Image (tube, helix red, strand yellow):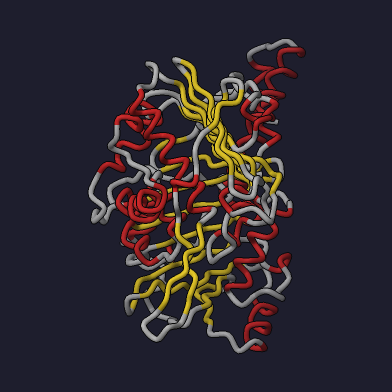
Amino acid sequence: MFIKDQFQKINIPFKGKVIALSIIGVVFLLLLFFSVRSQYLKDTLVDFVPSDAAVYFHLSLPQLNRSVGIENLVHQILADAGLADFPLNDIKREIGIVGRIKDNKLNFSYLVRTDRPKRLAEFLNDKKLNYKFLRSDLALLSQDLSADFKAGKENQIAIKTKNQFSNFETIRIYLRREAVGYFDDDLLKSVIGFLPATGDDFFLSARAKNGGLKITSLGEKKIKPKKSKPVALQSDFDLIFSTNELDKILKPLKGSAADSSFWGLIWQSYIKRGESRYGLDLSGSLADELKRGKMLFLLSPRATSFLPAVFSRQFYLSFSLSQPMGENEVKEMEEVLKKLMAWSYPKEKAVFLSDGTKIVELMPDISRFSFTDENGVKAIDSPDGQTKIFYQKTDNFLAISNSFDLLGRDFSAVNWDYLKIKFQLLPINTFWRYLVGFKVVEFLNGEVSLK
């Protein structure tokens, strides 16, 4: 009535009154919607996280769109907390995972917010799980029911994450650099090594979208993807990696193998292993030339079980060249490919021990392998004739593959700075099992998504 009386006093036409009232109504509803949504979805667990926490993972259940990948993620978390049989609908609100370093181990506790605290308490008592309620609707499940799990204004984790995450994120992750040393997964350490850090802290958030997850922020960087779609060829492969900044990616790997940084871990885990087995060399003239241009690596889904692991799938690797390869560079490349074949097809060598016992050792012998020219394509054969490695080069291009068909295909339309990995290629261990319900992780135009 008050608003109506004010309109009448200033003599606004009826049509104008309708428009003005509509605008006021829409604004009021929007403010109400965002206020309720913010309160409903905000992280109310972080205030209870101890300041010495090295890991904090927050999952907002109201933000979830049900899909196989997301449901697997939630059920794996509940199983770790001892809640595998507890109905998800009885939780409804939030789940938090807190990792603390104690006795030289990373120990995890779980925070569960529920609409049905009585039912949760009965379940936990029946399972004989160690717990206590920090609030009428918030339970702590932990071997350490420390008094440190309490709300306070001096909570350092709450202070650190306050400006990093919005209230509309499905997943929020805080990770202290120190915690990474306690992970037993080299691949996970490598992935973390690529994340931008804020001092000694890592921050990552993701939002449920179209049945998957999209990474919305890495550290202080908010991800704003460009509008672009992968070209058609990307549906043909289990792994695709393309970059026009290979030198930039590999530059940090030139450090010492004793380096304890993330890049040092990658060096020790992958680069040194490749150098010792296949004769890879990041300091040679061939490597320097290849790193200057674009690189494309493809791995097909067609696996052949009876072949050596490195050849069980068809692969394609290409580089753009700034200048023609010299004779020494060609020889260097062929030596690497020969070693790859020699290690995959070792030669049997009889060895007699001091007591006369005969044993057979498998030794790589590159002298058994040589390249032949097949209409401009160089090829090397395995002894059993089951495997070939091909390479083809021009003045500005080099391609290597174990498939003559792939070598002849045109991949010039590929998206550059693109990565796609099917999760079936990843090890199912303590970390990656959380993601096995998803099919693909994809990086394109600055956006990272799990589908």
Which residue: 40% across, 44% down? 194
User: Between 284 and 86, which is closer to the camera in this rendering?
Assistant: 284
User: Where does residue 187 sit, x and y in percent of width and height?
Assistant: 46, 55
Q: Seen from this angle, which residue lies furthest front? A: 356
Q: Quadrant of the N terminus?
A: top right
User: Between 181 and 269, which is closer to the camera in this rendering?
Assistant: 269
From the viewer's perspective, is residue 45 above or below residue 9? below
User: Where does residue 339 sit, x and y in percent of width and height?
Assistant: 44, 46
Which residue: 67% across, 79% down? 118
User: Between 68 and 3, which is closer to the camera in this rendering?
Assistant: 68
User: Between 174 and 13, which is closer to the camera in this rendering?
Assistant: 174
Left or right: 307, with 332 as reference point: right
Residue 316 visible in the current orientation: yes
Q: How many circles with numbers are drawn on the protein?
A: 0
User: Where does residue 332 sit, x and y in percent of width and height?
Assistant: 37, 34
From the viewer's perspective, is residue 298 above or below residue 154? above
From the viewer's perspective, is residue 83 above or below residue 64? below
Left or right: 336, with 103 as reference point: right
User: Where does residue 197 sit, x and y in percent of width and height?
Assistant: 34, 46
Residue 445 visible in the current orientation: no
Which residue: 42% across, 76% down? 352
Left or right: 96, with 85 as reference point: left
Which residue: 35% across, 53% down? 276
Q: Quadrant of the C terminus?
A: top right
Residue 87 is drawn in which quadrant? bottom right
